[in-house]
Image: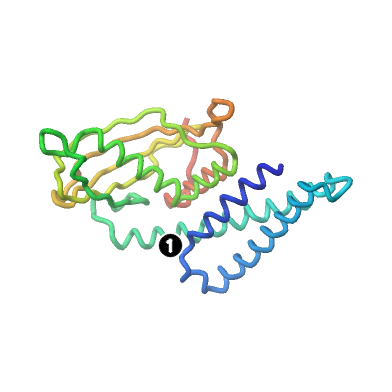
Amino acid sequence: MISYAKTVLSALLSSWDKQDGRHAKSIQMQTKIIAADFLAILLIVLLLIVQYNSLHNPMILIGPMSMAIIGLERLAASTNGSKVARNRTMLEQNKVQPLANYPVVIKLPIQWGDQDAFGHVNNTVAFRWFESARFAYMEQSGVDPLLTASGLGPILASIRCDYRRQVKYPDNVQIGTKIKRLGSSSITFDHTVYGESEQAVVATGEAVVVVFDYSSNQPRRMSDDVRSAIGLIEGESASEQM
């Protein structure tokens, strides 16, 4: 219980530290921050009491600790919903047409060292682009902190790339990411790479990621919270497809 509480608290505080200060000016956000601070302080005090054995029967604190954790989780889910909505609005304003249906789009510069002896970006670089795009998706959707709080993480099961055009330095690429399929424990990501100099799609690909318990070395069933977070950023209910 204590280890789980510390994990949840750490993930939440890290997430809140990244919030844009402009949004904290709203009354709703201020209320959430005050409530979160109160619950966080309460949880820390309870943890310290248990740690230093100030009570003869620390088990009586399990109830209050559980309530504080549940409150923090609910606040995180509420705050994440607002954050996803803001991210979607910002992205919609800047998307190129081929990436219009992708909820998460990142932009990366081409590095001189990305090129090989043939003077174009080496084929292996696209897999790094996909990786960066996947983690951006997991962070913006809230999936990453949800998995972390449960002691789980993503593990890559398979990946492929179809190359459409050469990419050369200097240039920038935009990588769009969306979910193609949800399994019981797997997520299939769909990637499209747009080259700004070419003004065209230069590569497409897919990656299958599994929800994984690294401590037991076993896959785990995807939680309803993770499915809801994906459904929120995708703009529709994410239903399991077997």
Q: In this view, does 199 lie above or below 85?
A: above
Query: Which residue is depicted at the point 21% across and 33% down?
Result: 123
Would residue 104 be found to the left or right of residue 202 on screen?
right
Q: What amino acid does circle 1 point to?
A: Arg
Residue 57, percent from left and from top? 87, 45
At x 11%, y 38%, the residue is 119
Q: 122 or 208: nearer the eye?
A: 122
Q: How many marks?
A: 1
Q: Return the x and y of residue 213 as percentages of the image width and height.
A: 55, 31
Residue with the most extreme right position: 56
The picture places residue 60, in percent across and down from the top left corner, at: 84, 48
The residue positioned farthest toward the top in the image shown: 217
Question: Dot 1, how many residues are within 10 Å of its Cα: few (below 14), some (14-19), or many (20+)?
Answer: few
Quarter holding the N terminus is top right
Residue placed most toward the observer, 193 or 46 = 46
Q: Taking 20 as reference, is 197 above or below it?
A: above
Furthest residue in direction front, as rendered: 52
The residue at which mark 1 appears reads as 86
Quadrant position of residue 214: top right
Query: Measured from the top left, where is residue 142 in percent x and y?
Result: 49, 50
Q: From the viewer's side, name the closer residue of 227 and 143.
A: 143
Q: Which residue lies furthest to the left in this view?
A: 118
Check the image and tell me how it is coloured: rainbow
Going 41% across and 44% down the picture, which residue do you hit?
A: 135
Residue at 14% across / 51% down in the picture? 197
SS at mark 1? helix
Give above or below for 83 relative to 114: below
129 to 24, vertically: above or below = above
